[in-house]
Image: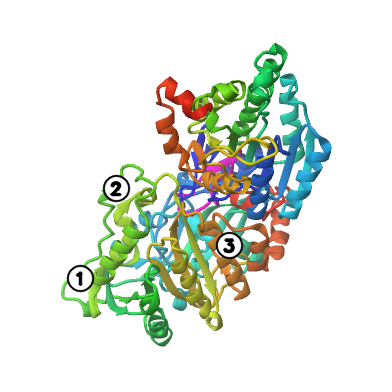
Amino acid sequence: MENAFGQPQNVVVLGGSSDIARAITKKLCAARAHTVVVAGRDQARLDEAARDALDYGASRTETVVFDAEDPSGASAAVGEAFAKAGGHVDLVLVAVGRLGQQVLDQSDPAAALRMMNVNFTWPVVALTEARNRLVAQGGGRILVISSVGAVRVRASAYLYGSAKAGLDRLCLAMADSLEGTGVRVQVLRPGAVRTRMTEGLPDVPFTTGVNEVADTALKGLSSAEAVIWSPPLLKYVYMVLRHLPGPVWRKVMDR
Amino acid sequence: MNRQRLSGWGRTAPAMSEVLSPASEEAVVDDLAQADAVIARGLGRSYGDAAQLSGGVVLDNRSLGGIGAIASDGVVTVGAGVSFDELLNVAIPLGWFVPVTPGTRQVTLGGAVAADVHGKNHHRDGSIGDHVLEMRLVTPSGVHTVTPTSEPDLFWATIGGMGLTGVVTTVTLRLIKIDTDKVLVDTTRFACLDDVMAAMVAGDDDYRYSVAWVDCMTRGASMGRAILTRGEHATRRDLEATSLDAPAPAKLRVPFNAPSGLLNPLSIRVFNEAWFRSAPAHREGEEQSLGSFFHPLDGVGDWNRLYGRRGFVQYQFAVSDAEAECVVRAIERLSSSGVPSFLAVLKRFGPANHGLLSFPFSGWTLALDLPVGPAALPEVLDDLDEMVIEAGGRVYLAKDSRLSPGSVRVMYPRLPEFLAVKDRVDPRHQLTSDLARRLHLVGR
């Protein structure tokens, strides 16, 4: 069961081998998490993430392998994860995503489809399944990793950004739809984060490490906020950025 | 189906449950026979998740009412869903008072038994369980009449058992005689924690009721400044005009959730300062009504909303006299971490009773109200757990919403004995709660 600070005991992590997911999972385990099911694409990397969880205090871990390019398998993957968690699942962390390579992907219809499947369609199917299960068990929490890039989509990452934008808005409305059910949905909007996914890209302002994102995420879980910004200051930065006139926006964001 | 979103008084970690309102013992038996997982709930004054069950069935005991005639020796049998408020409304005009009352009248007798509540007189009179003569208890294995002599192990597993042995339907207890509806109160202000603790050790035995309010926001020399109030029921001889009136209902309500930051370090500091200055340096024999002495917070309905949407936690622990230093260190840890805390309540405890999961034992208890929000709070409280465990103390389950399963096993070493009794009357562990699940108290 989750405690008063939103610290869960039973956790399902979809996309569990991503760097941000691993950082959050470690901190959850250092707090109260004892059962962690990590689900993702690559068994070896999942095993690593599971070992992390045990090192940081979990007492039981399980893994589930799925392919995020195939949304038809999302429902079964979530079902398997819940079954392996056993009992009440307190938190579903959705960290499935791929940044892709915009310049290559934007002219390749198959790549565009892949980007939408991984960043939007698979997560939406999984969220639908998780929602049903959490409502049935009487409560629980879903934390979805979105991106500040979802607030206003940049040309230089529009496939990724627009898929995240769709996911982000869907989650906010899903949160509204779950008002009064005991189930909460929160979205985490990190700015640029130094991870494997962004390796080789230059640091932009407000770039953070994964541990800062994880700290912010844990603090967010103890709040009633639907949107968690990391770093928190980005909330105000984007209040301005999102209203910039087009030419200025392009100049600032797509240098 | 009546699905409701329930949480404790601290308004954290809500969950949906199916709520049933059985109006008789037979109905409770039927509900237990049909439900897979069940917990009873009274007025929801436990701070955490003790009286909720995510996805399960919650039996609202408020439908189990009825107050029997009060015998000449003060013995009365009441439905488990009767509140202290309702009982006192009947009892006070007849010259009777409850032997133990928590800080609010808005708890049911069933809930009071499940938490083995204590009051300002624990050092003299023990907790509510010490005054219960008999209970009717519905368990999955049948209906039991439990007394301290007929089924002592089931009786003492149920006293403080957080509702996990069964559903209490009636409670028989002995009331105490009062002459008037007034308490004579002595108030003294202390500049620091050491002074007030010394005064309590020296003088509490001379008073039936005693409690100190401690300011946890000051540091340095005035760390833990406090106001000590102690009292006795006034007799007819003490007063010029006497009356026996039941306490008045709340006049004020908090109509909506305050913004979450309303109670912040600054506003709490200002409040504590004003409150400390408003108390007299020393005053003796002040007449106070029963309501304002025992239940000051009942004057404002839904005051928990002041803490905003995120809610709050209460941390209450007990340590022995030999570990009094732990109280000092706990307040130091809080005041140095910048975590805001409303006035803390400090009390002396008398000897423990036989309740297997009962909280009080000889020494000190400190209770702290803490708004959820400061990032450091979860860790600060985990540190306090360690301090309390090291001092051989424990945290009160009725207030808890964040302990870990490992800590509880150390704090409540009689848990295996409790589980042995539970296994006998509830072999499938049908009676469970979100608290029981969170702390791994039962098998499911």
Q: Nearer the viewer, mark 1 or mark 2?
A: 2
Task: Give a yes or no on whether discs 3 and 1 share a subunit.
Answer: yes
Tag 3 subunit: B
Callout 3 touching callout 2 (CB < 8 Å): no
Q: Which residues fall within the magenta stretch? A: B42-60
Q: Secondary structure at mark 2?
A: strand
The amino acid type, in three-letter code, at marker 1 is Thr
A157 in magenta: no
Residue A30, horizontal then vertical, whole percent: 66, 54
- Whole-number angstrom distance, CA of label 3 to CA of label 1: 49 Å
Quarter of the rendering containing residue B351? bottom right
The amino acid type, in three-letter code, at marker 2 is Arg
Q: Which residue is mark 1?
A: B242
- Please name the residue shown 16% across and 72% down the image: B241
B304 or A129: which is nearer to us? A129
Q: Nearer the viewer, mark 3 or mark 2?
A: 3
Badge 1 crowding class, 10 Å Cα cut-off, few under 14, some 14 to 19, many 20 or more, is some
- Whole-number angstrom distance, CA of label 3 to CA of label 2: 34 Å
- Residue B422's disc number: none
Of the numbered discs 3 and 1, the one sitting upstream in the chain is: 1
Residue A186, horizontal then vertical, whole percent: 54, 36
Q: Secondary structure at mark 3?
A: helix
Q: Which residue is mark 2?
A: B253
The amino acid type, in three-letter code, at marker 3 is Asp
